[in-house]
Amino acid sequence: MLRPAPYLTQKLTRPIPITDGGMLRTVLHARTYMLGLSRAGELRTQWQRACELLLAEDDVADLSRAPELALFYDAKLDVSVGTASARWLSSDETSRAIAAAARSTRSAT
């Protein structure tokens, strides 16, 4: 039986709740989620950045923030779970992220 590489078994800095009820807890969970993205999702800048960090086996703290931000932009981050999903963003960054998400939602309709 194959074992995941040690990097993939590392825990993210905090669990990332998803609106479908799932939870990303390890690098492997984040990788599996990314592999399941639609083609349109794969092409989004936020997911591209998360993928780059994953492939580079970058610091887990940096990697942890990337899928959380991408899920936030996709409106798939479950903020009702009680985690402060945007606590690592400054208030200016949070405002810009919300405005960008609103623009992309309007342009998609």
Image: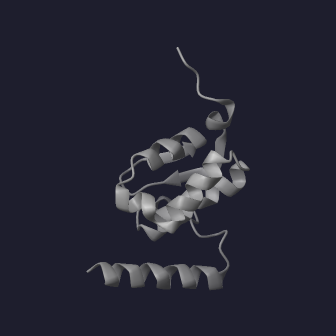
Farthest residue, direction top: 1
* Spot occupied by residue 17 in the image (x, y as percentages of width and height): 48, 54
Residue 94 vertical position relative to residue 26 in the rendered view, above or below? below
In this rendered view, identify the residue nearer to me: 40 or 4: 40
The tally of labels here is 0
The answer to which image quadrant residue 18 occupies is: bottom left
Q: Position of residue 35 (x, y in %)?
A: 44, 45
Which residue is pictured at 64% across the width and 53% down the height? 53
Name the residue at 53% across, 65% down: 46
Most foreground residue, 106 or 77? 106
Report the residue at 55% width, 19% height from top.
2
Which x, y percent locates residue 50? 57, 56
Image coordinates for residue 103, horizontal then vertical, percent: 41, 85
Q: Is residue 66 left or right of residue 108?
A: right
Q: Is residue 95 visible?
A: yes
Closest to the observer: 27 or 23?
27
Q: Is residue 82 visible?
A: no
Residue at (42% x, 47% y) in the render? 22
> Is 54 situated left or right of 108 in this image?
right
In-front residue for pair 7/14: 7
| Occupied quadrant, residue 67 | bottom right
> What colouring style does the render use?
one colour
Residue that protrudes farthest toward the right in the picture: 59
Does 4 appear above or below 40? above
Check the picture and name the quadrant holding the C terminus.
bottom left
